[in-house]
């Protein structure tokens, strides 16, 4: 019999049961009902937490979280799972890029949140305390946003806590996406969780509002591989995938409002000093040249012609 059972609000499945529901909490005094699956397996094991839709227009990741929640079999699950397909609920119908429409903030920059802060900070605080903090292992599913193209990659954070960092790296390898990036994004889900001692990864697949079968499958196959790696579901440990480990995640941002002309493609190998693209004004005068800060690989590119000051342009993994 399991020694520990998950309960979130009124969701309290028995061992060998899965429940779907939407626990309610308050955000800026209004009810916020967050749909999720809570699964208590029939035998004891670890707790896996999977979130999607922290960025609510990264559809391949949301489609994958929905598939996982719908398909998880509580009878064969060893351990426990929580699956939240769309954390940033108001941003989903709004098709909002990057931010939560309630306060205009990027939810993946405010974790572990603040119960007395702005709407995004309040959402993050509840999700961190009631969902993510339950995890022995945590996966946050992402992808390129509506205006981002990317080559799939998995991010983990070296927090300085050796055991946690080692397990995060093993999770990233088990997930099976070939590019692995070591990075801290302050205020992100996985950085906050890693700091709290929970081995965590953030996976990126899909983008530009498109969610092909292949994009979704990278996430769902990765979750299947990870759960076999953790011995949470039946099946053999996954075969290792050759991977490229990138120790730096270098973002370039626009210094101007204008028109963005990338000169490279996602996945392309680039050299330090290479011209990666230009921001121009209406007449074509170059306002800014994006110069590669290192030898590496282009991991994502903003595909929007319209660019705002401080917007990301692209990122190089080195
Ligand atoms: Zn994202």
Image (spheres, rainbow, N blue to C red):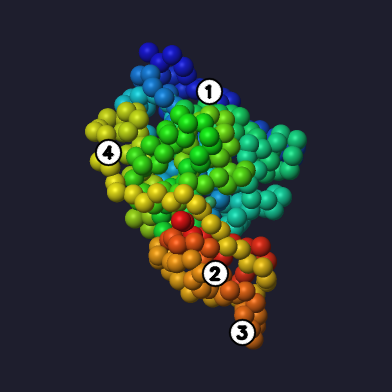
Instruction: Return the mark for residue 84.
Output: none
Q: Nearer the viewer, residue 230 or 191?
A: 191
Residue at the spot of label 4: 238
Mark 4 and mark 3: span between their CA atoms?
51 Å
What is the CA distance from the residue labelled 2 to the residue labelled 3? 18 Å
- Assess disc 2: are there few (<14), some (14-19) or many (≥20) residues with their C-alpha within 10 Å of its C-alpha: some
Tell me residue 249's x, y (percent): 51, 53
Mark 1 falls on what kind of element? Answer: loop
Disc nearest the viewer among 1 and 2:
2
Per the rendering, the mark at residue 7 is 1
Q: Which mark is residue 291?
A: 2
At 40% from the left and 49% from the top, the residue drawn is 245
Can I make out residue 216 in this image?
Answer: no
Give the residue displayed 63% in from the left and 83% down from the top. Answer: 285
Q: Give yes or no for contact between labels 3 and 1 (Cβ–Cβ under 8 Å).
A: no
| Foreground label between 4 and 2 | 2
Q: Earlier in the sequence, mark 4 or mark 2?
A: 4
Indicate which label's residue lies in the foreground, 2 or 3.
2
The image position of residue 128, as x and y in percent, is 59, 33
> Which is more toward the observer, 253 or 75?
253
- Whichever of labels 2 and 3 marks the residue nearer the N terminus, that label is 3
Q: Residues within 10 Å of mark 3 (few under 14, many from 20)?
A: few
Q: Residues within 10 Å of mark 1 (few under 14, many from 20)?
A: some
Front-lying residue, 219 or 196: 196
């Amino acid at each position: 019999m399991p020694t520990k059972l998950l309960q979130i609000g009124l969701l309290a499945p028995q061992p060998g049961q899965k429940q779907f529901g939407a626990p309610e909490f308050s955000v800026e005094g209004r009810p916020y009902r967050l749909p999720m699956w809570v699964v208590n397996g029939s035998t004891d094991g670890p707790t896996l937490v999977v979130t999607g839709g922290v960025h609510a227009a990264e559809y391949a990741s949301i489609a994958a979280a929905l598939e996982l929640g719908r398909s998880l079999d509580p009878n064969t699950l060893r351990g426990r799972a929580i699956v939240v397909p769309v954390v940033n609920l108001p941003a989903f119908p709004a098709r909002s890029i990057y931010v939560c429409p309630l306060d205009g903030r990027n939810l993946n920059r405010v974790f572990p949140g603040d119960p007395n802060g702005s709407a995004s900070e309040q959402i993050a605080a509840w999700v961190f305390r009631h969902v993510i903090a339950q995890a022995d292992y945590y996966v946050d599913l992402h992808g390129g946003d509506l205006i981002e193209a990317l080559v799939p990659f998995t991010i983990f954070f070296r927090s300085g806590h050796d055991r946690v960092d080692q397990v995060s790296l093993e999770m990233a390898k088990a997930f099976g996406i070939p590019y692995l990036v070591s990075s801290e994004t302050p205020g992100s889900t996985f950085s906050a969780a890693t700091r709290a001692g929970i081995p965590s990864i953030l996976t990126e697949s899909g983008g530009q509002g498109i969610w092909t079968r292949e994009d979704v499958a990278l996430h769902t196959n990765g979750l299947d591989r990870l759960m076999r790696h953790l011995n949470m579901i039946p099946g053999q440990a996954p075969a290792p995938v050759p991977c490229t480990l990138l120790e730096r995640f270098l973002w370039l941002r626009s210094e101007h409002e204008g028109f963005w002309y990338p000169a490279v493609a996602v996945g392309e190998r680039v050299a330090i000093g290479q011209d990666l693209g230009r921001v121009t004004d209406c007449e074509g005068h170059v306002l800014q040249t994006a110069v590669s800060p290192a030898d590496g690989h282009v991991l994502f590119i903003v595909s929007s012609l319209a660019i705002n000051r401080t917007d990301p342009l692209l990122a190089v993994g080195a």
